[in-house]
């Protein structure tokens, strides 16, 4: 599936917008993919930002959407809220799973 | 021991044959199927989607944990993805063990852990034409 990236705001085009910032592509699934109309989303965060901060900034982009709680996976493993993110991490939002 | 995400129709009897061995005295076959009613709403079908790379890793990790915990490597799990019709199998867990107690327990452990942590989502389609991601709240 091709990723539909959100355009980066003009002020950020030269860099990340933070003195020591990083750019992360966040994978979206199920209701999150529907709410954003995309299967991934590019976000700008300060280097070393936590999983919790990432979740907050993603949800702030769709304050009106009735999105369920979500966990974050970093490099295909469930992460804790305080875990720090690094440039190049594979990050994914994991809303409530329903396999079986 | 083997785990897989598949798009083809699941064949439970093939998985059962795969775990069968003369060292085992018991084999348990669990088949999860698409049910016609969920939470009082008539369902016409289900789409299963996954974060495939991570789902494969989690499934394999669960199988390894079950093998260590219950003492058998005769364990196969397949989960189907895509659009499924009523009655079709969405998941098959086949476990064999020298004794029935551990075979039952290993089977239960695998399906419960799968439902708890493998990143797979299902969108139910209802008779009235709406559809909804299960557990996410709100129809779309």
Image (tube, rainbow, N blue to C red):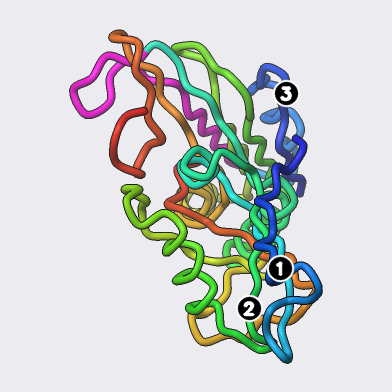
Discs 1 and 3 share one subunit: no
Residue B125 in the image: above or below residue B122: above
- The reply to whether the C-beta atoms of the residues labelled 1 and 2 are less than 8 Å apart is yes
Which of label 1 and label 3 is nearer to you?
1
Quarter of the view holding residue B124? top left
Which of label 2 and label 3 is nearer to you?
2
In-front residue for pair B139/B64:
B139
The reply to whether the magenta stretch includes residue A53 is: no
Pinpoint residue A95: horizontal percent, then vertical percent. 46, 53
Secondary structure found at label 1 = strand
Q: Mark yes or no: residue B72 visible.
A: no
- The reply to whether the C-beta atoms of the residues labelled 1 and 3 are less than 8 Å apart is no
Residue denoted by label 1: A24
Residue denoted by label 2: A45
Chain of the residue where label 2 is placed in the rendered structure? A
Residue denoted by label 3: B14
- Residues in magenta, as a range: B25-43
> Distance between the Cα atoms at labels 1 and 2?
8 Å
- The reply to whether the C-beta atoms of the residues labelled 2 and 3 are less than 8 Å apart is no
Q: Is residue B117 left or right of residue B21?
A: left
> Distance between the Cα atoms at labels 2 and 3?
49 Å
Secondary structure found at label 3 = helix
């Amino acid at each position: 599936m091709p990723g539909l990236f959100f355009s980066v705001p003009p002020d950020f085009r030269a860099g990340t917008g933070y003195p020591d910032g990083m750019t992360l592509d966040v994978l979206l699934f199920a209701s999150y993919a529907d709410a954003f109309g995309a299967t991934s989303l590019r976000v700008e965060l300060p280097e070393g930002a936590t999983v919790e901060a990432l979740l907050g900034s993603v949800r702030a982009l769709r304050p009106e959407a009735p999105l369920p709680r979500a966990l974050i996976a970093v490099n295909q493993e469930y992460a804790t809220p305080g875990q720090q993110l690094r440039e190049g991490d594979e990050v994914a939002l994991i809303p409530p799973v329903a396999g079986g | 021991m083997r785990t897989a995400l598949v798009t083809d129709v699941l064949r439970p009897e093939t998985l059962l044959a795969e775990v069968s061995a003369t060292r085992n005295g018991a084999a348990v076959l669990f088949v999860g199927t698409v049910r016609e009613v969920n939470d009082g709403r008539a369902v016409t079908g289900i789409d299963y989607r996954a974060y495939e790379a991570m789902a494969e890793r989690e499934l394999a990790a669960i199988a390894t944990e079950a093998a260590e915990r219950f003492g058998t490597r005769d364990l196969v799990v397949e989960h189907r993805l895509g659009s499924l019709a009523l009655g079709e199998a969405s998941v098959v867990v086949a476990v064999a063990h020298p004794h029935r107690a551990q075979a039952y327990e290993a089977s239960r452990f695998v399906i419960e852990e799968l439902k708890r942590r493998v990143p797979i989502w299902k969108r139910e389609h209802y008779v009235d034409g709406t559809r909804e991601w299960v557990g996410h709240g709100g129809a779309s």
